[in-house]
Image (cartoon, rainbow, N blue to C red):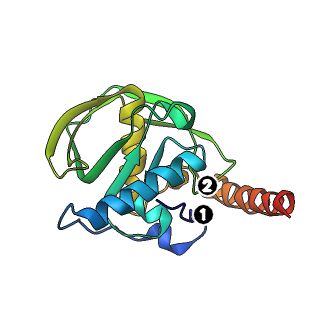
């Protein structure tokens, strides 16, 4: 396993639309292992392949958090359907928009089908935090970031904040 570089805004690769995976094989599992390790290392709970520059429909997630690492989940070619009318607000963040958080409302409950780590078809209902997170990650596959739901002014402010955050991080590391 290896830690990969996470792309941040305004990197144009993040706007690319990810392509379906043809086969869940060892090469794909190696990518998913790298993604999981990269996500834990960055203190995240979800990561889409495009965030490490790979335009494939692959998502990793662990809602137990980077400390516990108890519930790693892998989603290949995920499809969402039947969103609930009830919405859930959540203060979202994103590893590609580090240091910025904003409340986004998404359906509270949604149906989800995907292939798992072994290529098995899975169908389940995502609710609460799981629903919020999978919808956020699914957006990445379409080149959409949570800041795209904000006003243009707020979005520009977010990108500025990320640039400043990255500069300060670079200085700390130096
Ligand atoms: Zn994100």
With 85 as the anchor, is 119 left or right in this view?
A: left
Q: Evaluate if marks 2 and 1 touch, with contact meaning CB atoms under 8 Å apart.
A: yes
- Quarter of the image for residue 23 reads bottom left
Q: How many marks?
A: 2
Residue shown at 31% from the left, 58% from the top: 29
Residue pointed to by mark 1: 8
- Quarter of the image for residue 22 reads bottom left
Is 2 above or below relative to 71?
below
Most distant residue in the left direction: 121
Task: Confirm if mark 2 falls within 8 A of ligand 1.
Answer: yes
Residue 57 seen in this snapshot: no
Residue shown at 42% from the left, 39% from the top: 133
Residue 55, image x, y percentages = 37, 70
Assign a secondary structure to mark 1: loop
Label 2: how many residues lie within 10 Å, few (<14), some (14-19) or many (20+)?
A: many
Is 30 above or below relative to 125?
below
Residue 117 seen in this snapshot: yes
Residue shown at 30% from the left, 63% from the top: 28
């Amino acid at each position: 396993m290896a830690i990969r570089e996470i792309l941040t805004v305004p990197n144009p690769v993040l706007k690319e639309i990810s392509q379906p995976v043809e086969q869940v094989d060892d090469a794909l599992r190696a990518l998913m292992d790298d993604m999981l390790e990269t996500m834990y290392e960055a203190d995240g709970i979800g990561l889409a392949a495009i965030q490490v520059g790979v335009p494939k429909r692959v998502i990793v997630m662990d809602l137990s958090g980077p400390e516990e690492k108890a519930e790693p989940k892998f989603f290949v070619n995920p499809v969402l359907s039947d969103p609930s009318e009830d919405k859930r607000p959540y203060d979202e963040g994103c590893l590609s928009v580090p240091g910025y958080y904003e409340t986004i409302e998404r359906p509270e409950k949604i149906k989800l089908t995907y292939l798992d780590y072994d290529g098995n078809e899975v169908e389940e209902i995502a609710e609460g935090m799981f629903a919020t997170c999978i919808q956020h990650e699914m957006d990445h596959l379409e080149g959409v970031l949570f800041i795209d739901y904000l006003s243009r002014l707020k979005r520009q402010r977010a990108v500025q904040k990320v640039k400043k955050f990255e500069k300060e991080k670079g200085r700390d590391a130096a």
